[in-house]
């Protein structure tokens, strides 16, 4: 059967969802988008995504693809985004839709990802950011955190910074191209980009850096934590609601 493949770029506020994937309990973002696709295409296409996200994590640039029989598709890619958004709740939006080549796969063609994590570093939380940023009321030492962040760049075994899953990972080695911290007043933005990420790895990195910023351990300890390959020796896992999947390369 002659089929068409489409690539979607999806943004969502993850507050109300149990992560991206279709869930046994609770609702995943994927389920909502597949529900909208089913309204437009009798074939009820399945979505394949570039990433999974945890409960409460947000996205601006989640990439996914689906296929439909050519006979069912009467609209342009531009109209497709509008039509899907008409069926989606306001906390999920298709920001772009495009025809994809037959061999394209959202997950296997992803060359890398960029995540951003927001921290509000002030005694009083900004109420407008309460679902978007982690509130850290005590003063943070930006210089110490930046010194610690440098140890993460490059190719490392990140086992000490990832939560364990209920299955064994083939490899826990990943390459980070970037681990920067920007500051604008009380708002800190952690920019973490790499070829791939382990389960809760970004949140383990940010939690550890924040603890270094609070003086819990010297920034150079991060080198030792990486070498130990043991989650128990590294810092805490930052809360989910400060994390955004910013972009997929």
Image: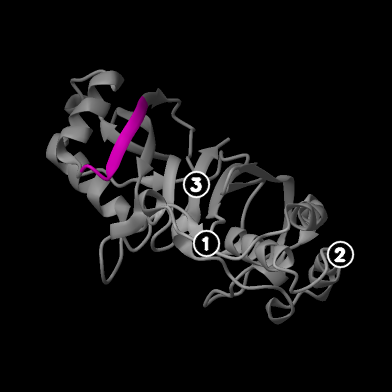
Compared with 129, 214 (above or below) is below
Of badges 3 and 1, nearer the viewer stands 1
Mark 2 and 3 residues: CB-CB less than 8 Å, in contact?
Answer: no
Residue at image position (71%, 72%) is 160
Mark 3 and 1 residues: CB-CB less than 8 Å, in contact?
Answer: no
Q: Secondary structure at mark 1?
A: loop
The C terminus sits in image quarter:
top right
Residue 248 in the figure: left or right of residue 169: left
Compared with 150, 72 (above or below) is above
Q: Which mark is residue 123?
A: 1
What's the distance in space between the residues labelled 2 and 3, CA to CA? 28 Å
Residue 248, image x and y in percent?
A: 54, 38
Residue denoted by label 2: 220
Q: Secondary structure at mark 3?
A: strand
Residue at image position (41%, 51%) is 129
Mark 3 surroundings: few (<14), some (14-19) or many (≥20) residues within 10 A? many
Q: In this orientation, does residue 53 appear?
A: no
Toward the front, the furthest residue is 123
Of badges 2 and 3, nearer the viewer stands 2
Total tally of numbered discs in the picture: 3
Q: In this orientation, does residue 140 appear?
A: yes
Q: Earlier in the sequence, mark 3 or mark 1?
A: 1
Q: What span is colored magenta in the figure?
A: 90-97
Residue 206, image x and y in percent?
A: 63, 60
Q: Give the overall secondary structure of the magenta segment.
A: strand
Residue denoted by label 3: 245
Compared with 150, 81 (above or below) is above
Residue 56 in the figure: left or right of residue 26: right
Mark 1 surroundings: few (<14), some (14-19) or many (≥20) residues within 10 A? few
């Amino acid at each position: 059967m002659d089929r068409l493949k489409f690539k979607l770029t999806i943004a969502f506020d993850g507050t109300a969802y149990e992560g991206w994937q279709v869930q046994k309990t609770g609702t995943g973002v994927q389920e909502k988008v597949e529900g909208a696709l089913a309204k437009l295409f009798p074939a009820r296409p399945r979505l394949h995504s570039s990433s999974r996200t945890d409960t409460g994590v947000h996205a601006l640039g989640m990439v996914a693809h689906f296929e439909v029989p050519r006979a069912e598709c009467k609209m342009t890619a531009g109209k497709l985004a509008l039509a899907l958004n008409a069926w989606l709740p306001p906390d999920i939006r298709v920001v772009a839709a495009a025809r994809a080549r037959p061999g394209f796969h959202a997950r296997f063609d992803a060359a890398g990802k960029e995540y951003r994590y927001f921290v509000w570093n002030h005694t009083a939380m900004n109420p407008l950011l309460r679902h978007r940023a982690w509130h850290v009321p005590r003063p943070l030492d930006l210089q110490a955190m930046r010194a610690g962040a440098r140890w993460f760049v490059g190719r490392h075994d990140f086992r000490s910074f990832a939560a364990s899953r209920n299955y064994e990972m083939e490899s826990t080695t990943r390459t980070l191209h970037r681990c920067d911290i920007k500051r604008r007043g009380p708002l800190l933005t952690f920019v973490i980009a790499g070829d791939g990420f382990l389960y809760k790895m970004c949140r383990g990195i940010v939690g550890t850096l924040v603890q270094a910023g609070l003086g819990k351990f010297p920034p150079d300890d991060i080198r030792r934590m990486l070498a130990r390959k043991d989650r128990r020796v590294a810092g805490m896992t930052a809360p989910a609601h400060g994390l955004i999947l910013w972009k997929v390369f």
